[in-house]
Amino acid sequence: MTENNDKLVGELTKIREILDSHFSRTQQIVDWNVANAFMWKSEDKSFKPVKNVNAIPLELLKGIDKNIDLLFENTKNFSKSLPANNALLWGSRGMGKSSLVKGVHAKISSSSKNKLILIEIHREDIKDLPDILNELKQNTKENFIVFCDDLSFDNDDTTYKSLKTALEGGIEGRPKNVIFYATSNRRHLMAREMIENETSTAINPSESIEEKVSLSDRFGLWIGFHNCSQEQFLSMILAYAQHYKIPAKEDELVSGAIAWAAGRGSRSGRVAWQFITDLAAKYKINIY
């Protein structure tokens, strides 16, 4: 009997140590003054400061002026604790969706009197949103943008339900000092085949589809990104070259950029940056 009791006490001690360790991690004190941006680390439930954010100046984002104005105004209102919407930036790849979020944050956080913090969460960690929001609402001195890049959901993925609840905040409502920004190539965040599969297999397909499609309705601000024209593409190239002082003639830039885009089979902000990176290397100019 004594031996069994000793084993039981030993097992209970191990369980207590595990729980104490988990509790200490989730209750850690975060110093929000060390940076304007953080990354959520799911493995230990912590916020990792990012002191140098890879942000492109807004003036270098060409061909999306209206999108810049929409997100900038929404974010500026939020930084002043005024009403603002969760935002979904959707559309063509490489057209500056994530660059716009980081660029807007950088500009506003550098000039705003109120603390504005960007927190990036990986798509696979969406399940942690309740823990994140619970932590952020305790810090009423700061305003937080929770940002998820390239957000989408596939078949048999139910984590979208966590996002739906987080966006509306359940019976408590979304914390007033937190807003959610996401980028996606999909307007409704769901693959087309995922929605079509619901149509063919669900007992009541219309209700099942409505539950999934309604996720994007939780975002009050939709900002669409579309394929750019050659004129817009070249304006990006010329703006980058001028900003980084690349001493190439305009005809060299234009002909080179057109050939580069043809080789890639597409035109976008990402392709423009890749061309400039290659060109800068030839001229031995450090653009990082």
Image (tube, rainbow, N blue to C red):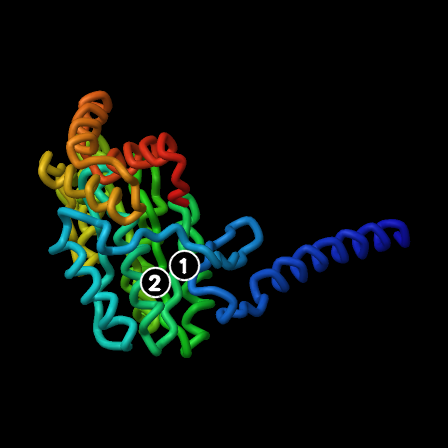
- Secondary structure of residue under mark 2: strand
Image location (x, y in percent) of residue 230:
10, 34
- Which quadrant would residue 236 be assigned to in this image? top left
- Secondary structure of residue under mark 1: strand
Residue 244 badge: none
- Which quadrant would residue 105 be assigned to in this image? bottom left
Disc 2 marks a residue whose amino acid type is Ile
Image location (x, y in percent) of residue 145:
34, 62
Q: Rounded to the nearest whole Å, what is the CA distance between mark 1 and mark 2?
A: 6 Å
Q: Residues within 10 Å of mark 2 (few under 14, many from 20)?
A: many
Query: What residue is at 49 percent from the left and 71 percent from the top?
Result: 33
Circles 1 and 2 in contact, beta carbons < 8 Å:
yes
Query: What residue is at 52 percent from the left and 57 percent from the top?
Result: 48
Q: Quadrant where the C terminus lies?
A: top left
Image location (x, y in percent) of residue 186:
21, 40
**Along the viewing direction, whichever of 242 and 209 lies nearer the viewer:** 242
Can residue 186 be seen in this snapshot? no
Residue 140 lies left or right of residue 187; in this view the side is: right
**Along the viewing direction, whichever of 167 and 275 lies nearer the viewer:** 275
Residue 36 lies left or right of residue 57; in this view the side is: right
**Along the viewing direction, whichever of 230 and 126 lies nearer the viewer:** 230
Residue lying at the far right in this picture: please name it: 2
Compared to residue 35, the image places residue 284 above or below, namely above
- Which quadrant would residue 116 be assigned to in this image? bottom left
**Along the viewing direction, whichever of 125 and 199 lies nearer the viewer:** 125
Return the residue at label 1.
119
Image location (x, y in percent) of residue 183:
27, 48
Q: Residues within 10 Å of mark 1 (few under 14, many from 20)?
A: many
Query: What residue is at 41 percent from the left and 42 percent from the top?
Result: 286
Return the residue at label 2.
145
Residue lying at the far top in this picture: please name it: 263
